[in-house]
Image (cartoon, coloured by chain):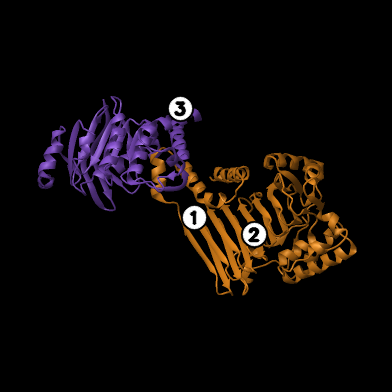
Chain colours: A orange, B purple
Amino acid sequence: MNVAVAKTGKGRAVSDLFTSAEGRLPGSPTVIAARREAFETYERLGLPHRRIEEWKYTDLRALVGEVLPLAAAPDAPALKRAADAVKAYAIAGARKLVLVDGVFAADLSDVKALAAEAGFKTLRETLEKDAGLLKTASTDAVIALNAAMATDGVVLSIADGAQLSAPIQIIHIATAASASSFTRSQVAVGKGARATIVESFVAAGAKTYQISDAVLVTVGDDADVAHIRLMDDAPDAVNVTSHFVTVGANVKFNFFNMTTGAAVSRLQGFITLAGDGSELSANGVNLLQKTEHGDTTLVVDHAVPNCVSREVFRAVIDDRGHSVFQGRIIVRPDAQKTDGKMMIRALLLSDEAEADNKPELEIFADDVSCGHGATAGALDDSLLFYLKARGLPEKQAQALLIQAFVGEAIEQIADDNLREHVIGIAERWLERRS
Amino acid sequence: MALLEVKDLQVRVEEREILHGLTLTVNEGQVHAIMGPNGSGKSTLSHVIAGKPGYEVTGGQILFRGEDLLEMSPDMRAAKGVFLAFQYPVEIPGVATMTFLRTALNAQRKARGESEYSTPDFLRKVREVSKSLNIPQDMLKRGVNVGFSGGEKKRNEVLQMALFEPSLCILDEMDSGLDIDALRIAADGVNALRSPKRAMVVITHYQRLLNYIVPDVVHVMSKGRVVKSGGKELALELEASGYAQFEDAA
């Protein structure tokens, strides 16, 4: 197996990851030069480790160790498996955009139906012209690696005032074992537009694989956007995803993330409230079992006055699972009248389960209302006994209480159909519990 | 026929023996009242019959229709027809009452190898019973017991009793925290469930409840034993003379 080892002092091995993939990475010569630069940044930093504060609880060097070689483009049997997965995971009525092993699959996607409502291109097409989408302000190594290696993604633009009639569902499907895929997407929502974007990560046959994804979101003034990410990758997979979101004025932005898969995962979201009077609701659920490690890291930056942010996170951890939630609320000096609240609760189902909750407030303005809370505990025995005394077997009684526990985060999803879809994934997780 | 037979039951809670050889037989169709002062072991008995963790049975046995109840998990006891109406029903936020009722009923039916209730049949039944207990429909949409008054919580217990149709109902201090009107509604609900096939054990500190649910047999418990049994007139006697005489006897 041609495995490239990241930053172990063997510089040669690290470079192999890039040089062996280079011929397949799309882009003009300028883009390739930008990729090289990004790769050099990654190579200099290596995978993040515990001595980097932001990665303290998710030491990728220890947990992942090596970056697997780039997945080959999917062949016909792979696409066939992916088609079956699409059927299983598609949300009824949604416009699908499907990426298989990091490559856009037009035949599995609803490009025509979408064209009437939103502008769409692939990242591959975009990179023929310029490297803009590969650039972010971040100095994070995983984001640099993603910029260097991104093979494809979806680039969506939703026009000012557009009212999307159906959700857009971006489905990432992994079919290739022992390989990694790198995707990068952009969603630009115009002023006054209304849209729902769902991202689903699933496996079709592959067990051990690595996903690196980056999503750049901009939301115009007065828009109303729901952004839902459902990561249900295979139990031995790795998924590291970064979101960069910039929100305009008087926007309603509703974000939800659910982690129900992957051996190691991290979602890091950087949300900047850049326009007055916007409301952010950012919620999530981590459901972890076996030795799964799930990290949700969210930085909410109140850059301007009069914005509201609400965060509700729930983690349910069984066996030797490890949940990490890092939530930082930054209130800039100008951001007076900021109202930011964050509530994190972890439910530990075994003695060996672990939760690290790290809420942080960085407040530089003086007229604000901010707060956070974090709790961790076990299921309430008196509630369990009541349910059992009414005829529910132990596992079923636990499941009902777990569903109630995560319900508080899931109920923030306004759309009934989507909420039911999310509850369905949570129920399947509960059924997988041994 | 004997439905419940408690024989020489000895129970400990953390090294302390609470029941010291309690014997009690309840036949089908009978209503038994168990009275006694605080700390006499009344609630312990109800918890052990229902299978609440934290109690150690060190001697004796409990038979239900001749089967060893202590060998069964709490959910299996429920499926067999044992129902404990809690003194303090718990609040379960996030679990809608209707979902809870249907899940519990179907779990019991499944355990007994019966088919699950169809949704229309279930809804019809819930509507019918809740109406007779003066339980508004919107209460059933809320979380189980969340924000319910004391009377509403007890009515919810009676509602479950009516839905699950157990053959043994144990009412643990049903009158605690209820005013006289709430008590009457709950007691009427219980009386409506009296049947030749169903037995009830009414645990109470006060005689008052027995004016509404009239027992066939009254037992007096003191210090972890039944010290006297008699007809319903025994309750009145206790009301007049108090428990002190039995504390000496025990």
Q: The residue tagged with tag 1: helix, strand or loop?
A: strand
Name the disc covering residue A266, or none: 2
> In the image, which disc is placed on residue A89?
none
Percent x, y for residue A420?
Answer: 59, 43
Residue B114 has which mark?
Answer: 3
In the image, are marks 3 and 2 on the same chain? Answer: no
Q: Residues within 10 Å of mark 2 (few under 14, many from 20)?
A: many
- Residue A104 visible in this rendered orientation of the protein: yes
Q: Secondary structure at mark 3?
A: loop
* Of B95 and A63, the residue lying toward us: B95
Q: Quadrant of residue B8?
A: top left
Q: Which mark is residue A348?
A: 1
Residue B73 visible, this orientation: no
Looking at the picture, how far across and down is residue A342, in whole percent?
54, 62
The quarter in which the N terminus of chain B is drawn is top left
Between discs 1 and 2, the one toward the N terminus:
2
In the image, what residue type sits under mark 3? Glu
> Are dots 1 and 3 on a single chain?
no
Q: Secondary structure at mark 2?
A: strand
Chain to which mark 3 belongs: B
Give the residue at x 74% y 47%: A175
Residue at image x 51%, y 56%? A353
Image x and y of residue A289, in percent: 56, 51
| Circle 2 chain | A
Mark pair 3, 2: CA separation: 46 Å
